[in-house]
Image: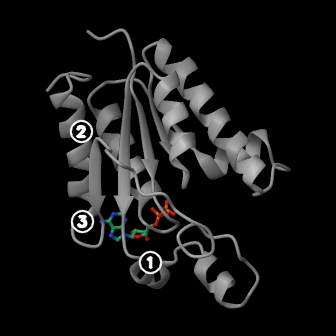
Amino acid sequence: MNDHGTVIWFTGVPASGKSTIASLVENKLRAGGLPVENLDADEIRANLSPNLGYTAQARDENTKRLAWMGQMLSKYGVNVIVAAVSPLRSHRDRARAWCARFVEVFVDCPTEVCQERDPKGLYARAASGEVNDIAGMHMPYEVPASPEVHSRTDQVDAEACAQMVIDKLVELTYIGS
Ligand code: ADP
């Protein structure tokens, strides 16, 4: 039995599929009897820091909080799921440095497909000029250099993407098979 949990960090542009895969992974871990907490970035913002905003400094602060909560919970054996655009490599690397067990999942999908999906209406709001700070569109999204898992969500269905994450956790011996 491992005494340390894993922080599983999903990164990718909006509508790439982070939350969808994250909740499938959450369900699979829970079904396996493992403790798991899903720190959804939007929920954490809404509940802990509703006034934070989306400036560069605020995004830095938000990823810092997620990473800090992740390392705190994982110390006590909880597997922690974070789904956050987290466009900057330096922010993700900071999270990695803080967490003893860290699995970065690059949720990769072409912008055109994300725009068609648009489950939260974000790209529609960008088209009408209401939003102008989407990573991968208006501001850079720094592609992960060596993520533990690379999910092409335009090519592989969500269930298979989630299973790839579970398989990686097994391969790293962070969970049992
Ligand atoms: P994000 O959290 O990255 O903003 P969401 O998970 O909220 O994205 O939305 C992604 C959308 O794309 C959902 O409507 C989901 O059903 C759809 N989708 C289609 N194929 C996939 C896939 N392979 N993986 C994840 N989501 C997918």
Residue 24, given in percent of the width and then of the height, sits at 34, 49
Residue at mark 2: 166
The yes-or-no answer for disc 3 within 8 Å of ligand 1 is: yes
Depth check: 134 or 142 in front?
A: 142
Kind of residue indicated by mark 2: Ile
Q: Are marks 3 and 1 in contact (CB under 8 Å)?
A: no
Q: Quadrant of the C terminus?
A: top left
In the displayed orientation, state which residue is furthest to the right. 51
The residue that mark 3 highlights is 157
Name the element at disc 3: loop
Q: Quadrant of residue 91?
A: top right
Q: Between marks 3 and 2, how big is the CA–CA gap?
A: 15 Å
Q: Secondary structure at mark 2?
A: helix
Indicate the quadrant of ligand 1 in the picture.
Answer: bottom left
Q: Secondary structure at mark 1?
A: helix
Residue drawn at x 42%, y 18% is 100
- The amino acid at mark 3 is Asp
Give the mark, 3 or 1, whose residue is nearer the N terminus: 1
Residue at 39 percent across and 14 percent down: it is 4
Q: Which residue is mark 1?
A: 111
Question: Which circle, 3 or 1, is nearer the viewer?
Answer: 1
Residue depicted at 79% across the width and 43% down the height: 49
Q: Name the residue located 26 percent from the left edge and 9 percent from the top edge.
A: 1
Q: Is residue 2 left or right of residue 130?
A: left
Tell me: residue 109, above or below residue 144. Answer: below
